[in-house]
Amino acid sequence: MNGDELREVLAAGPLLADGGMGTRLLAGADPHDPPVELLTLDDPGRVAEAHRAFATAGARLVLTNTFAANRFRLERHGRADVVADLATAAVPLARASGAELVGGSIGPLGVQLRPYGRVPPEDAVAAYREPAAALAAAGVDLVVLETQTDLREIALAVQAVRAVAPGLALAVSATFTRDDRTLLGDRPADVAAALAELAVDVIGVNCGEGPSQAARVIAAMAPHAGGAALAARPNAGGSSWRIARDAASNSMQQTDGADAITTEVQGCATA
């Protein structure tokens, strides 16, 4: 699916996406267990069941279980060599849910880039290219770069995705702290303007402090989004909340958190 085709889908009305995949898979798990993304290879039935639950609850878009599937995060668990295999296996599991669309989830690398850290830009681009290429080859409908906090890293990620999947629709969302700024201090307007300059197809917010914040952020982004579609994908609440939700109730929370100008709505991780 290219950007124009995605915009046609979104023009027909809000697109309800799934909830917090990681949160659902972590339910009842030991906090010291390996990343839930590895369940795609190690326990695919559990991942497939989670996707089906979200689709049954009404999600038209489900995201692959690949948020942390990059070499930097997986090498901490001795599995850096399975990035492509994991991404390739994740797509049919999501597709089997019966949802209308499958998005390839790619989260931040989890490392600091130069000059604040040790990772040079070219290594960051290579790390993003790996899952993006595998997800595109496996047939996702769009790539979703999510929970981003660094505009420099976002630019490198977009560069990587465009290099390996130039015709594929691309959505990018940032996450904001309680003061409605990213961890590096960027305002929603700054983020939207930067993403509009990068010509991404969907601009949005995910995780953060709940539906009310997501609505504020989307409203602040809208005048600077350059006509891009907007996505609100909030947590159920901030870090002071302790809420357990099944797939159906999470989907209802997503609907309640939708802003009138938002074309994609989704839940993220509950706190």
Image (cartoon, rainbow, N blue to C red):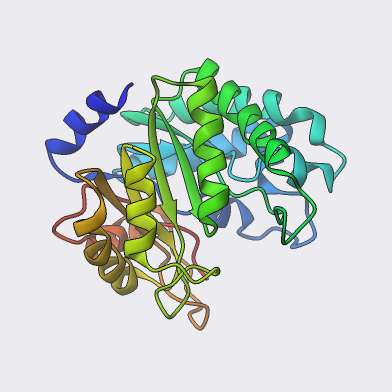
Q: Position of residue 43 (x, y in %)?
A: 69, 35
Q: Is residue 135 left or right of residue 235?
A: right
Judged from this view, the residue extending furthest toward the front is: 115
Which picture quadrant has residue 30? bottom right
| 161 over 138 or under it: above or below | below
- Residue positioned 17% across, 29% down in the render: 8
Could you tell me if residue 83 is visible in this image? yes
Q: How many marks?
A: 0
Foreground pick, 218 / 88: 218
x and y, in percent, of residue 88 in the image: 61, 22
**Quadrant housing residue 59:** top left
User: Which sits in the foreground, 16 or 27?
Assistant: 16
Residue in the foreground of this view, choosing between 5 and 125: 125
* Residue at figure coordinates x 39%, y 19% from the top left: 167
The residue lying at 80 percent from left, 60 percent from top is 32
The residue sitting at 64% across, 35% down in the picture is: 125
Query: The N terminus is located in which quarter?
Result: top left
Q: Is any part of residue 266 visible from this angle?
A: no
Task: Tell me if 138 is positioned left or right of 124 in this view.
Answer: left
Q: Position of residue 208 (x, y in %)?
A: 45, 68
Whole-percent x, y for residue 193 in the image = 33, 54
> Up-down: is 172 above or below 159?
below
Residue at the outermost right position: 78
Q: Residue furthest bottom?
A: 240
